[in-house]
Amino acid sequence: MSLMSPEEFEAALRAIGDERYHIHHPFHHLLHNGKLEKGQVQAWALNRYYYQASIPAKDASLLARLPTPELRREWRRRLEDHDGDGVKPGGVERWLKLTDGLGLDRDYVTSLRGLLPATRFAVDAYVRFVREMSLLEAIASSLTEMFSPNIIQQRVSGMLRNYDFVSEETLSYFKPRLTQAPQDVDFALGYVKRHADTREKQEQCLAALRFKCDLLWAQLDALHLAYVEPRLIPPGAFRP
């Protein structure tokens, strides 16, 4: 197979999102269309917390592998976006504001005692992937952010419209991501297009992005199985 042009390569990356991004998952449609009970929304927020809280650990492992100060400075911004800077709260703290607003005990959320096993397995697999795979594949796996503005807009507008137990303040995690994610994509997509200079590397990047979409999908599969149909909640997991 011959090397794809930069335009063809980007189109192939975006096609993965069109097919596999979890905006298409039935659980997401239930969530933003107001079809879930409060306990089901709580289960989503609690399990998603582990993903949000693991992003800085994932980014720190990638940061340590970047070879130049310029690249490290660029990626360090992601850590501040999620962990905060000691004054301005980051995404992890804003997600806890969401779980607080949904009536979940913060100590219980951060203890991770209520996680679905599949959530833990999926998120840990992502952190391990970024730590162990090539730097190019690790960066390519972050490109699900190309697709996130659409899902954020659907989620926020749908939840505000359909649930009387959420507010704009409760959902404050999402607004900064509408500007942060495109900025992250500008760098990561440019890096991947420059450094995937063989067809083999391009295929590795496509596989990395499919992997990331699959693990996001798997997390919603687990939520649907446990809390929607057939409601098979594993031992020890959160029970609304």
Image (cartoon, rainbow, N blue to C red):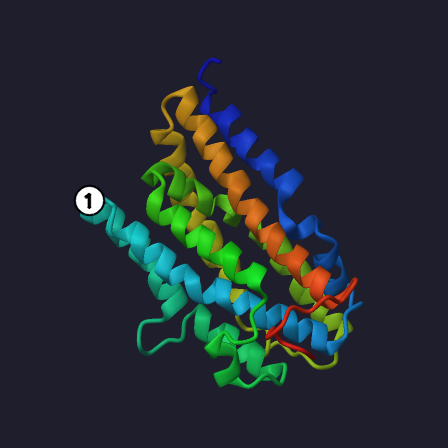
Q: How many marks?
A: 1
| Residue 146 appears in the rendering | no
| Residue 100 appears in the rendering | yes
| Percent x, y of residue 108 | 52, 82
Q: Quadrant of residue 198?
A: top left
Which residue corresponds to the image point at 65% horizontal and 39% vertical from the top-left?
18
| Percent x, y of residue 206 | 50, 33
Residue farthest to the top, as pictured: 2
Q: Nearer the viewer, residue 68 or 49?
A: 49
Mark 1 highlights which residue?
Answer: 68
Which residue corresponds to the image point at 49% horizontal and 67% vertical from the top-left?
50
Answer left or right for 35 relative to 236: right
Residue farthest to the front, as pictured: 235
The C terminus, quarter of image: bottom right
Which residue corresponds to the image point at 45% horizontal and 44% vertical from the top-left?
141
Q: Nearer the viewer, residue 51 or 97?
A: 51
| Percent x, y of residue 65 | 25, 47
Q: Is residue 53 above or below residue 73?
A: below
Secondary structure under badge 1? loop
| Percent x, y of residue 10 | 51, 31
Answer left or right for 187 relative to 33: left
Q: Residues within 10 Å of mark 1 (few under 14, many from 20)?
A: few
Q: Nearer the viewer, residue 17 or 10?
A: 17
Answer left or right for 213 relative to 222: left
Q: Is residue 146 above or below residue 111?
A: above
Which residue corresponds to the image point at 62% horizontal and 51% vertical from the top-left?
217
Q: Quadrant of residue 48?
A: bottom right
In the image, what residue type sits under mark 1? Thr
Q: Nearer the viewer, residue 172 or 218?
A: 218
